[in-house]
Image: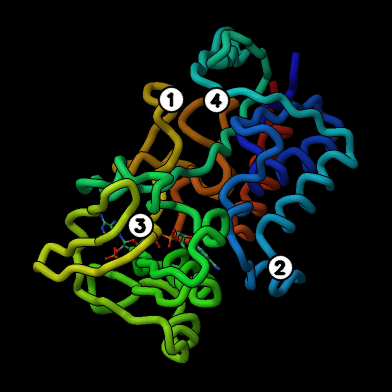
Amino acid sequence: MLDVLIIGSGPAGLAAAVYAKRANLKVLVAEKIYCGTGQIAESNLVDNYLGFSGINGYELGEKFREHAISLGVEFKEGEAVRFEQEEGIWHVTFANGDAQESKTVIYAAGAEHRHLDIAGEKEFSGKGVSYCATCDGAFFRNKVCAVIGGGDTALDDALYLSDISSKVYLVHRRDAFRGSAKTVEKLKQKDNVEFVLSAVPSQITGTEKVQTLQLADGRSLDVDGVFIAAGMIPMTGKLQGVAELDAGGYVVADETGKTSAAGFFAAGDVRTKALRQVITAVSDGANAATSAEHYIRQQ
Ligand code: NAP
């Protein structure tokens, strides 16, 4: 039987694994995507993780993973779909039918991309519609792209694409950005970036590939690619009835990671908190593993 089953191999899960392993606990990390490191792998540039100024997100994720592996942390590929606690033991079932028993669970499954749910979005997904500029940007060399959103992801994506594409429209539904003012300033210096503000996307059209992004006010942009950066949704769909969730679907937990369920801890972007960054995810992982260790010793 495991001491700690960690769900998710992003920064929160990997930090939890390092702390749990160093506390001599029997730990396994379950990951939905083989050798994944979560959303960080999609980030072209991470400039605010202490000590690693200007590092590529994929590279930083690999460093986290190598650290966990160097301590002997083991991984299992699979999507956890059911969590049940019987006589103090967590029974976790995976989509392929596998099961694991553990004294504690650290849930660090992260978040998924929010969709706009507009006409053409699904139809042209992979045919010009993308949720990851770092992954797909290279397909739009010298082409025209629109980035949708006003947060840090949209701003970073627009900056990244401005070095690849001939023209980038940054389309935001309000006239004020949510993301970093410093990045907005950098974007203003770019000749090939145009801000399209107070603009609500209504439809993506084309024949075989994307050709036009239509806006609700009647404006229309001729584009080859549409990058949607409209935020994230926590991956907590399987936690209904397991632990308390807030109205946004985040697991209710303070910085100790303790949830409403005994022996079930939350870490990273799935947790209720003010700042969702790599550095806070790593901190959550350390805290959750320490809480799990204390819990096991008390039992
Ligand atoms: P976010 O901050 O939640 O921003 C999402 C953006 O999408 C908002 O501007 C929002 O508009 C817009 N939006 C949401 N639904 C929409 C819809 N249906 N139609 C049109 N627009 C829509 O998400 P994020 O940019 O992915 O960032 C998530 C977290 O990661 C943040 O804490 C961010 O700071 C962090 N992050 C940090 C970095 C970095 O430090 N380098 C990089 C990426 C992300 P409104 O503003 O009107 O709500």
User: Which element is circle 1 on?
Assistant: helix
Q: Left or right: 241 with respect to 72?
A: left
Indicate the position of residue 143 as horizontal and vertical percent values. 44, 69
What type is the residue that disc 3 sits on? Ala
Residue that badge 2 annotates? 55
Q: Which mark is residue 268?
A: none
* Ligand 1: image quarter: bottom left
Residue that badge 3 annotates? 230
Residue that badge 4 annotates? 262
Q: Is mark 3 within 8 Å of ligand 1?
A: yes
Could you give the CA–CA distance between mark 4 and mark 3, rounded to whole angstroms?
34 Å
Could you give the CA–CA distance between mark 1 and mark 3, rounded to whole angstroms?
23 Å
Q: Earlier in the sequence, mark 4 or mark 3?
A: 3
Q: Which of marks 4 and 2 is nearer the N terminus?
A: 2
Residue that badge 1 annotates? 238
Look at discs 1 and 3 and give the one toward the viewer.
Answer: 3
Q: Residue drawn 74% across and 19% down?
A: 2
